[in-house]
Structures are given as structure tokens and as C-alpha cells.
Amino acid sequence: MNDMKVAIVTAAAGAGIGAAISRRLAADGIRVVITDLHEGRMATLSDELTQTVGSECPWYKLDVSDHGAVETVFNEVAKRYGSIDVLINNAGWSKIEPVSRMSLETWQKCIDIDLTGTFSCMRFALPHMIEAKSGAIVNISSISAWEMTTEHGAAYSAAKAGVMALTRVAAAENGKHGIRVNAIAPGLIYNEFLRRIYPDEFFDGYLEKKAVLNRLGQPEDIAYLASFLASDKAGYITGETYGVSGGVHPHA
């Protein structure tokens, strides 16, 4: 059996939240299994994490909207390392279209990746955690689930609200098995990918208009909380959603 905790992180390649969480968990001494669709960037990060941990941190190409592929990858990880102790559901996608003109393709793709993908990963991690009578799941939602705004798009906001509800129900179902399920709702966490989604005016004046702490959020801001929620230090916390928005949208 594996003597290290094993964490699966989805959408882990690149410069965003997934990669930052992967680095933080690796620094915590966890074997991190990274999944994404970008093979080259995954291979680079895998090499980096392997050096950090001192043992293999592999990567798997995975589209979380492919239910069967999720089952295959998760079962392979459990077979290879003996457990799945931590799951970070970070994969997400968005395209901003008003409801009155939104294509069914846009709606379905967002739900498939952001909500159903989160479900699929939980569905195939939980049996291994139940068998082990322990585990921690951290789902990445968004403050868009709470906000009344046009900035994020209805499909994304609806999916992320669904992630929060899914988190609460899964926590209620699995606490008796020693499994904790929590969510993080980031505000604006900057990376270059967001420039492909949001118009320039979304970023213009953000510090002056919204940022209480006078800075943009960074992926590491989410990584530190994910590390805590995945650890035994958060052993009495489950079913919660934590906003990390720098005060832009406090929620209690």
C-alpha cells in the first residue's frame, strides 16, 4: 500500500489555480496526480512536482466531461498507488452569452465541464475514500454563484451554484465515512486565460472599483486554502463554501 497521501487535481496544467494547488500540495508532501488536456504543460509540471516530492507525481490526459474516461483514470490511480486521499475539482469552462441568445451548445458544455465533471470526479473518487474510511474533497466553485451580475454568464453561474449544492449533499452523505467535502468560491484570480473570456473593460478599473485589498487575487491565494481544507487541520470542517475574493463579495 501507498505510504504517501495521493491527491488528484483536475485542470492542473498552465499558470492558474490548478497548478498552484498542485505545487502547494506537493510541498505538503503529498503525491500529486495532475490531470488536464495539455500534455506538454502537464509533463513539465509533473517533472517539477516529482523533484519537489522526491517520488513520482504522474499526469493523465483527461476531459472531465467524459464520464467513462474519469472512471478509467481514477481507477488506474487507485490501483497504481493504493488510494485516492484528496480530490481537487478545479476544471472549469465559460463562454459569456446572454440567456436570450445563448446557444444550447454553450449551456451544455459549461454544465458538462463545470458541474457534471465535478460530479463524475466525485463519483469515482468516493468509493475509494469510503473503502479507506477517510478522504478530503475540495470543489472549486465561484462567487458568481452568489452574485447578481452579467459579468460571468448564466451557464457558468448556474453550474457553480450547482457545485455548492453538490458539495453540501456529498458532505452530508459521506461524513459517516470520515470524508470531508468543502468548496472554495474564488473571486477574480488573475491569469492570462481570463483575457480570452472577459472583455478588457472587466479588468479596467478593477482595483479602483472593487478590490478592497487593492490587488488582484493570485492562484496561490486559493492554493493555501485548498491545502488547509485537504489537511487534517481542517478535520472538523465539512459542507462549507469559503469565499476568497479579497472582500469583493463577502458571504456569510
Image (cartoon, rainbow, N blue to C red):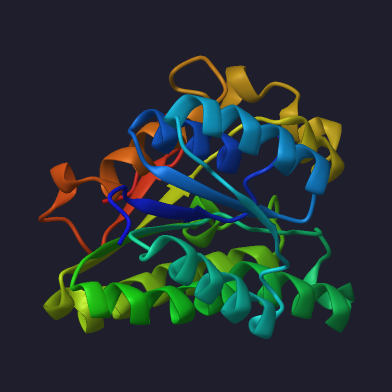
> Which residue sits at x=63%, y=38%?
46
Image coordinates of residue 107 in percent, x first then y, are 77, 76
In this picture, residue 101 sits left or right of residue 73 = right
Image coordinates of residue 125 in percent, x first then y, are 42, 73
**Quadrant where the N terminus is found in the figure:** bottom left
In this picture, residue 96 sits left or right of residue 188 = right
Image coordinates of residue 16 in percent, x first then y, are 64, 36
Image coordinates of residue 132 in percent, x first then y, are 23, 72
Location of residue 24 with respect to 89 vertically, above or below: above
Location of residue 108 with respect to 137 vertically, above or below: below
Residue 165 shows in the view: yes
In this picture, residue 226 sits left or right of residue 62 = left
Pick the residue in front: 160 or 92.
92
Residue 30 sits in quarter: top left
Location of residue 175 with respect to 147 vertically, above or below: below
Pick the residue in front: 125 or 109.
125
> Which residue sits at x=49%, y=44%?
186
Pick the residue in front: 115 or 11.
11
Residue 188 shows in the view: no
Location of residue 196 with respect to 88 vertically, above or below: above
> Which residue sits at x=17%, y=56%?
237
In this picture, residue 168 sits left or right of residue 147 = left
Q: Residue lying furthest front in this view?
A: 1
Q: How many marks?
A: 0
> Which residue sits at x=80%, y=49%?
38
